[in-house]
Amino acid sequence: MSRLEIADDGFRLDAHPFRIVSGALHYFRVHPEQWADRLHKARLLGLNTVETYVPWNAHAPRRGEFRLDGGLDLPRFLDTAAAEGLHVLLRPGPYICAEWEGGGLPSWLLAEDDLVPRSRDPRYLSAVDDYLGALLTPLRPHLGSNGGPIIAVQVENEYGAHGDDTAYLAELAAMLRRHGVDVPLFTCDQPSDLARGSLDGVLATANFGSRAAEGLAALRELRPRGPLMCSEFWIGWFDRWGGIHARRDPADAAAELDTLLAAGASVNIYMFHGGTNFGFTNGANDKGTYRPTVTSYDYDALLDEAGDPTPKYAAFREVIARHAPVPEDPLPPAAPKAAYGPVELTHTAGLLPHADALGAPATADRPLTMEELGHAFGFVLYETDLPTRGPAVLHAEHVHDRAQVFVDGQPVGVLERENHEHALAFTVPRPGARLAVLVENQGRVNYGPRLRDHKGLLGHTTVNGARPAAWHSRALPLDRPDAVAYEPSDPARPPVGPAFHRGTLTVDEPADTFLHLDGWTKGLAWINGFPLGRYWSRGPQTSLYVPAPVLRAGANDVTVLELHATATRHVHLRDTPALGATEE
């Protein structure tokens, strides 16, 4: 049993003074076969605890479902942490932010137009209650009170930046208790939001990445007694498409950590290891302009995206050793990286011609949102017939998030939410021509007042000022890129519009590698059906991390969905990533 207690002068663990020295490691951003490696490196750093969020939308992609399998096998992760001798801070939300799709809130909540998330709306609280019941029942054996590694559980997440309804937080805390959580609860907020986001009887903690002394002083002003803790000590940052790759000087971050630990405070380093937004799981920000987050969640963390220690790891280990025990074990060497070279993608399949194999259409007098189609991630394809030939203007009131427009299969333009675009002019070649609009969900907003982020064509969509009589809306989850029929590529007749490209990578011994897409424009990639994530020539990131467990000895299927065009039939597997330029 490992029971954490909160005393006036600090933490106690099993009645002994205890300082939490923790690092953030999200199991859902790391291949499960690599959990043990990352957790071992956490202990070697000198950490005694790891922290993880729990993404509600990943575990419950549809109402009434709950998954704890594969990369979402949280009990297995907890067992692995315990085997390494690490405690766990569990942050189940229901809202997590985390630069994760929708902040972890499931998209099916949006099917009810007036439901208010992060509030006492009874429908929201009922859904949260179901979620916490499904999550916490199998986790009870893993609570510290039952001999497990979980020593504390967070209530909500940075709620003070969102609202000030203390009764809402109290209801969530009561839910956690009703579902068997008998370890300490805590809240976390940025220093200026502490009063709004804290709850009587619950440990308050602060989030900051600099001015540590000021952050701790704000926390002490709110709570004159009890432990001081920074629950998110930000040591890097995330990247967005079209931006730069974030970097922070290791010495600067380490100096702030030293200040924090010298004050006697506990800490959770955010991030110890960032990992990857595999598939469609990246979030987005919208402070007047929509900005989607990239696939890599490297975060300039202590371990890089491939799990190797960085110079910042060494700097932090030295600081931690001044204040807490650090194992004398030598650090393991970097995991092997392979440069497998070029892979020719020899077969293709157009997306639009194979739409029937990817999803069934629903007909209505307007475009249906992804949420109305019961669709969380990926794309939606809208089609309608144009009655007359000649000049035309398509106007979409709201494009969420990126629309590629085709007439009779020919691309005529793109509308981007990020660029505040709404109208597109083109020529209709014949009466009855088919208008197709392929809309990509580039990531639901994960922070701020715009969390209710529906996807697709929203509001009024018109052609020459008139609404088409019928729209066919087709959800394309793209969870099975092998569902389409591939044919040998013909260099003399490259595909027009979005197309899947497939080839074979032969491997003698699997190792970590990086998929580089030189000459490709925008799309997604899979290896052996595993979704590596999105790529975009806009950068900063121009490669995708391929975990060694995704590969197998022998033949491996490489699939790329290119949404626009490519000047090459090859992709390259290299032993180094390309995460983009920095400000330095």
Image (cartoon, rainbow, N blue to C red):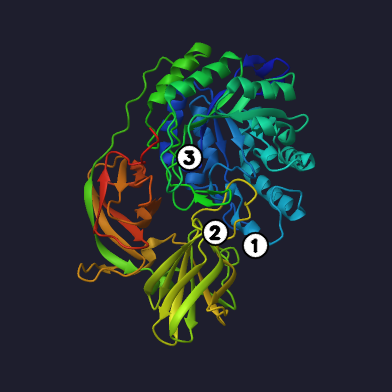
Q: Is mark 1 on a helix, strand or loop?
A: helix
Amino acid carrying label 1: it is Ala
- At x 44%, y 29%, the residue is 248
CA–CA distance in space, label 3 to label 2: 23 Å
Name the residue type under label 2: Ala
- Name the residue tied to disc 3: 238
Q: Is residue 332 above or below residue 93?
A: above
Q: In which quarter of the image is residue 430?
A: bottom left
SS for dot 3: loop
Disc 1 and disc 3: Cα gap in Å? Answer: 29 Å
Q: Which of 562 and 123 lies nearest the eye of the viewer? A: 562
Which mark is in front, 3 or 2? 3
Q: Which mark is residue 111?
A: 1
Please provide percent x and percent y for residue 343: 23, 53
Instruction: Residue 378: give x, y in percent of width and height.
Output: 48, 60
Residue type, numbered disc 3: Phe
Which residue is located at x 53 percent, y 22 percent?
A: 48
Residue position marked by numbered label 2 in the rendering? 376
